[in-house]
Amino acid sequence: MAEKRRRLRSSTVVLGGMGVIAAALTSCGSEPDRRCVDRDSYDFANGYKIIADKNCKSSGSGSTSSGKKRKTGGKTTTADADWYYDADVTGRYADYGTFSRSDAVDRDGFGCSGSGGG
């Protein structure tokens, strides 16, 4: 019976250790939290207005503005849409984030610097 307890403890340690390793390995490759925002909509009290994801291109870093047209009060304007990473979200606004995916990955990971791509 004592032998069973030892096995249980050692297997618990092994499983726990594997979980930590898995978390460390996947954190570098995981996508940081992102929101599609209109870069031209910044409000000092609220931040950037969140718009539909379809307005942002889904790939890569850097400027992903798609120039989608939208109607505002009867006139058509172009949204300067871009992905905004790791922001504090309140309602339909996001603030205190970054437009750089690589900076967002560096903030979150376990020493994943340089893995964000350019």
Image (spheres, grey):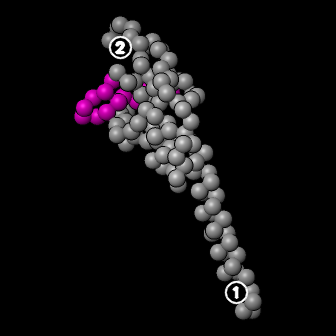
- Name the residue: 49% across, 36% down: 101
Residue appearing at x 33%, y 24% in the figure: 41
Question: Magenta span: helix, strand or loop, mainly?
Answer: loop
SS at circle 1? helix
Percent from the top left, x then y, of residue 88? 37, 42
Picture quarter containing residue 25?
bottom right
Q: Magenta segment range?
A: 41-53
User: Does the magenta-highlighted stretch encompass residue 96?
Assistant: no
Label of residue 41 in the image: none
**Residue bearing the label numbered 1:** 5
Q: Nearer the viewer, mark 1 or mark 2?
A: 1
- Where residue 12 appears, as percent x and y from the top left, is 66, 75
Provide residue 94's location: percent of width, then percent of height.
37, 36
Gap between marks 1 and 2 measured at Cα: 68 Å
Which quadrant of the figure has residue 10? bottom right
Residue at point 48% right, 24% down?
63
Does 96 sit above or below residue 109?
A: above
Residue position for label 2: 72
Q: Amino acid at mark 1?
A: Arg
Left or right: 115, with 81 as reference point: right
Name the amino acid type tagged 2: Thr
Q: Is residue 86 visible?
A: yes
